[in-house]
Image (tube, rainbow, N blue to C red):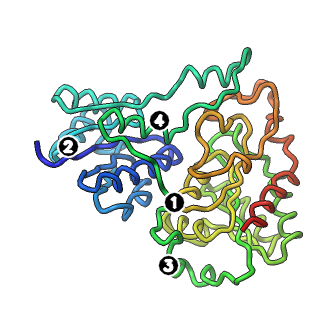
Amino acid sequence: MGKEHILIIRFSAMGDVAMTVPVVYSLAKQYPDVRITMLSKGFARPFFDGLAPNIEFVAADLKGCHKGIKGLNRLFKELTSKDITAVADMHDVLRSKYLRARFKLCRYKTAHIDKHRKGKRQLTAAENKRLVQQPSSFNNYAEVLDKLGYPVHTEFTSVFPSGKGDITLLPDYLQSKQPKEQWIGIAPFAAHEGKIYPTRLMERVVKLLLERHENCRIFLFGGGASEKAVFNDWCQRYERCVSVPDSVKGMKQEMILMSHLDVMTSMDSGNMHIASLTGTPVVSIWGATHPFAGFMGWGQSIANAVQIDLPCRPCSIYGNKPCIRKDYPCMKNIPPELIVERIEAVLNSI
């Protein structure tokens, strides 16, 4: 057999793919002679480009040339030309299962993720709920590699070798952070309502921070049209607010900016995980979901997870289930002052 070459598969949402980075990086560093191909959607390329010399990123075009069975067969053929020796399925969904099955039929060594669904069902049960910490996604990903014979000790600090991204690659007005200036990121949105702190309350957080910290600048992270509209409204009314989607271009620049923040404030969302990959402390806000499900950002402290106790929490692993009480008290009952206090605690610790 030729040189060892591991194919790692993880599609899905941005946060889930971001959580593979510390594990893939650790594998690359601890097995420098092993080639690694990371297969994911194109948006994830900035996570892996330049991460380690033995990592190659391959983008799956699941809505284009790799769509459906015919497209997956084409993708399989493309991958087999790379002399793969083992396959780590870190997703275990229909597409990855199909690819894994094809590799297995051709006698490749394969392993797949254990998502610990039973424990998560008990965590979100309406009755007889068991609030028990589930294994983190980082542990679950590392376990797949262990099954293949590549145990790793997960160690990771930042996607940027120096710890900070090159700030000179940002627009001129973002290259002028003053010595005593505090840069605070706020990512107030998420994919599902159960994970979104009410906009009117988040605006109160913004206002309190600006009132209490004369030397702070607040950077608003998001992407959708409705999110940009909120940001533009806040920027018009609060002078020291910056709309990130209107200021930088692409994921790489966003990550560079995140690496220079003193603290990021986010929901249980992709931005929590991306900021974690830059080594920035994150104050995360949790509603329908819970850190016990195993999706806390890499290296983040549970002390910085803002949440309130309710008998119905958590009701969902991903935040996509409708609120049984209809009004999402898990989010709307979190006082803005509580979030500000946690942000200030991080700032004071720097």
**Which residue is farthest left?**
1
The secondary element bearing badge 2 is classed as loop
Q: Amino acid at mark 2?
A: Ile
Residue 28, x across and y down, in percent:
34, 54
Spatial separation of the CA atoms under disc 4 and disc 1: 19 Å
Left/right placement of residue 318 relative to residue 203 reads left
Are the two marked residues, 1 and 2, in contact with CB atoms closer than 8 angstroms? no
Q: Amino acid at mark 4?
A: Asn
Determine the residue positioned at 38% across, 28% down: 94
The secondary element bearing badge 1 is classed as loop
Label 1 packing within 10 angstroms: few (<14), some (14-19), many (20+): some
Residue carrying label 3? 169
Spatial separation of the CA atoms under disc 3 and disc 4: 35 Å
Q: Amino acid at mark 1?
A: Thr
Label 2 packing within 10 angstroms: few (<14), some (14-19), many (20+): many
Q: Amino acid at mark 3?
A: Leu
* Mark nearer the N terminus (1 vs 2): 2
* Mark nearer the N terminus (3 vs 2): 2
Residue carrying label 1? 157
Are the two marked residues, 3 and 2, in contact with CB atoms closer than 8 angstroms? no
Residue carrying label 4? 140
Comparing labels 3 and 2, the label whose residue is closer to the camera: 2
Residue 128, x across and y down, in percent:
73, 15
Determine the residue positioned at 41% across, 30% down: 93
Q: Quadrant of the N terminus?
A: top left
Residue carrying label 2? 84
